[in-house]
Amino acid sequence: MQMPSSSGKLNGGLLSFVIGYAVVCCISLTIVIHLYDYLQIFTFERPLIVSAALIALPAIALSIVFAYAPFSFGYLTSFYLYTVVLGYLWLIPFSQFSYDHRATGLFALASLAGFLIPAMLINWPARPPISFTPKVMNGLLAAIVTIAIVTLAAGMYYNFRLVGLADIYQFRDQLDFPPPLRYAIGITLGALLPFAFACFVERGANIPACATLLLILGFYPITLTKTTMFAPFWLAFLWLLTSGMEARRVVILSLLIPLLVGVFVALLHYAGMISQPHLVGYFGSVNFRMIAFPSISLDVYNDFFSRHEVTHFCQISLVRSYTGCPYAEQIPAILARSYPVGSINASLLATEGIASVGTAWTPLSALLAGLVLSLGNCTSNRLPPRFVILSGGVLVQTLLNVPLSILLVTNGAAATFLLWYITPSPWLTQVRGKA
């Protein structure tokens, strides 16, 4: 069943949908501020909610573009980064840090606009010089699954621990994979297996699609990350949403539904119907860690780099080897000692923006990042929207928490763009076994 494509026309119903999402997002953030005030990053005061609403209003107004622009990979990434900036603007009045919040709020809004322009407008078709036959594509799909299995076996040789999510931090620092294997694991989980999963779904091969999700889950005892643990469930959730629903609504619902569930869980907790551990189990993982934390990282990065030298991209190993670096350690490790939020692996807005060039130049950095990620539009615009969402589903989650350079190389965004570029759309619609 093909997923309906977006029309690209202004849709009043979709605009109401987007604004409703912003309201729910702000409610969730308010609960985050109240529940996590012990971190001493925020001060919860009810009168500040009015100030937060006024500061967030320009970002909400900008969201009209999501009711007009057609679906693309850039639409998907833009909506997720919009969530990060909206969250940061809402958090500003509650922040306990003393940097210039007015200036950073304006630069954050400009960064969002800078990213949206190329990411949502550039969509030139990029057609490969050779049209690959169904036989070649079937062979490529088999090769991807084989590579994933070999990578899984190699990873098990270096590390395999069946531990709960609460215990992963006791062992994760002990992981020591050879660099080639570390890159292979990241690309396999971020690009190869989601691509294979999307191919199976689009071609109606449901059993291999489910097997692919189990293969992804098999990497959890090796990597010991929450991302790996939840990736199969996330992709299954997207699979359910894309079953006949218009692509832009799927993008919005992919965040709105988890947020709404978390808000409901928090309300049940306030009513005394859910215990603190159950609240932390869901709300802490989804509303706080997945949605709010990328916005909190902007607050932390703005505070730290308002008083410290920027990195000039020296967090990238290749750049560091030529230019040196004012910091002997990675920035997340330094921030972990200075702020009560642990090691912060932050988005491109924080790393390639605030940390690398300073807050004032972050809009330019975001513009360039949007240009880079618009390659995803150009290589995927011939492909079904459902396929793009499923094969890019892990990447877009990773986008919230890692720099662009890591997303492209370590997590496989560049590999995904290449796979999209060579994939013929007719092959995806052929029934498995008749190609």
Image (tube, grey):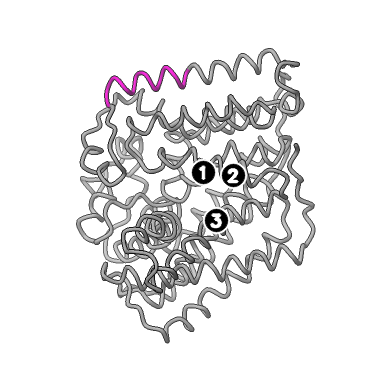
Going 70% across and 25% down the picture, which residue do you hit? Answer: 128
Describe the element under mark 1 as helix, strand or loop: helix
- Where is residue 370 shown, x and y percent of the image? 57, 49
Q: Indicate which disc, 3 or 2, sits on the residue closer to the N terminus.
A: 2
Identity of the amino acid at label 3? Leu
Describe the element under mark 2 as helix, strand or loop: helix
Dot 1 corresponds to which residue? 234
Residue 238's disc is 2
Q: Are marks 2 and 1 in contact (CB under 8 Å)?
A: yes
Q: Is residue 377 toward the left or the right of residue 40 in the image?
A: right
Q: Indicate which disc, 3 or 1, sits on the residue closer to the N terminus.
A: 1
- For the C terminus, the image quarter is top right
Residue extending farthest bottom: 47
The magenta segment is 147-159
Residue 255's disc is 3
Q: Quadrant of residue 304?
A: bottom left
Q: Is residue 153 inside the magenta stretch?
A: yes
